[in-house]
Amino acid sequence: MSYFKAAGLMLLIHVAFAGVGWLIATRDGALIATLVALCFHLGVFWYAEKIVLKLHNAREVNSDDTSPMIRAFVADCDKLAMRANMPRPRTYIVDAFQPNAFVAGRDTAHASIAVTDGLLKTLTRSEVSAVVAHELAHVKRGDALAMGVSSALAAIATTVFGCLAYPLGLRKRVSPIVAGLVARVGQSHRREYAADRQAGEICGSPVNLASALLKLERHTMSLLNPLAERSPATAHMFVIDPLHGPKRGPSASHPPTERRVARLHRQAAEMDGSE
């Protein structure tokens, strides 16, 4: 279903570009705008993953890393990907105190999972595995492509409206608002709930993911993520909203954590009852 949503977003962008082109120069303008939209689609499809990783200064890691925590993270990614019957995504570390994680990529064969070193230091190994399972679920469901498209759209809209607001001295106020509004087009509470449930099936313990989410919620409310603050268009790609720290109100990009936790505990009860 997420692939259809990504296609819908691309169609929306295509129509918007063509419409603006028509208003500017009728048929010729629409044709040029359509070609620009096509280039945008190709760029998002092939390079969104690299752009998102670059925005967060993510560095690739493998099983030969000197850190035992990172080696364990990569090994668990291998094991969980086998359980999910999919290739292991490339693994990345983001240097940030705030514990969090995100996924990027267009399909199961071209995907990357990034976790902050704060996540590896804050969670137990079983909780890290549960978070990895959540991100693998996003990849398997095709969510990463939809999230990448909406992030790219939000980034463009933020740049355009930010430039328009700059002469009025409102750029710092307008850019986050525009990014949040546009990113919400690609954001879905249902998608997060579905990924949570599938993660519980992949890792075998929904309770571990529930415990991880509670810890992440507590720490993301007390620790800022400077790179995420500079790239608010990517906020919905994280497992927990990374923005604004202590100043964060109800999250615009994620469902309430307490509801996610409650659903995971119900899933755990269902799994126990079926044994």
Image (tube, rainbow, N blue to C red):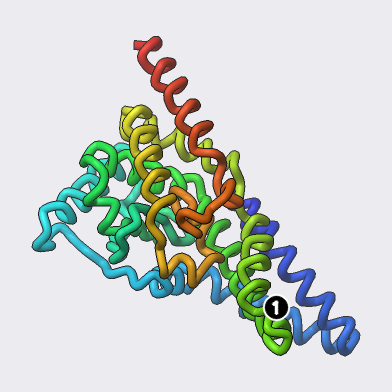
Give the image location of residue 145, x and y in percent. Answer: 53, 58
160 over 271 or under it: above or below: below
Q: Is residue 66 left or right of residue 240?
A: left
Q: Could one spot residue 84 in this view of the protein?
A: no
**Position above or below: 258 against 165:** above
For badge 1, the amino acid type reads Phe
> At 66% from the left edge and 76% from the top edge, which residue is drawn?
38
Total marks placed? 1
Q: Quadrant of the N terminus?
A: top right
Q: Position of residue 30 (x, y in %)?
A: 82, 82
Q: Position of residue 26 (x, y in %)?
A: 90, 85
Q: Quadrant of residue 115?
A: bottom left
At a point 49% along the width and 27% down the height, the residue shown is 263
Q: Residue at x 34, y 73 (%)?
A: 57
Residue projecting furthest to the front: 246
Q: Report the residue at 52% width, 56% height from top.
A: 247
- The residue indicated by pointer 1 is 161
Left or right of residue 155: residue 199 = left
The crowd level at tag 1 (other Cα within 10 Å; few <14, some 14-19, many 20+) is some
The secondary element bearing badge 1 is classed as: helix
Query: Does residue 137 appear anywhere in the picture?
Result: yes
The location of residue 228, given as percent across then percent down, is: 45, 65
Does 100 appear above or below 213? below
Which part of the image, by quadrant, shows the C terminus?
Answer: top left
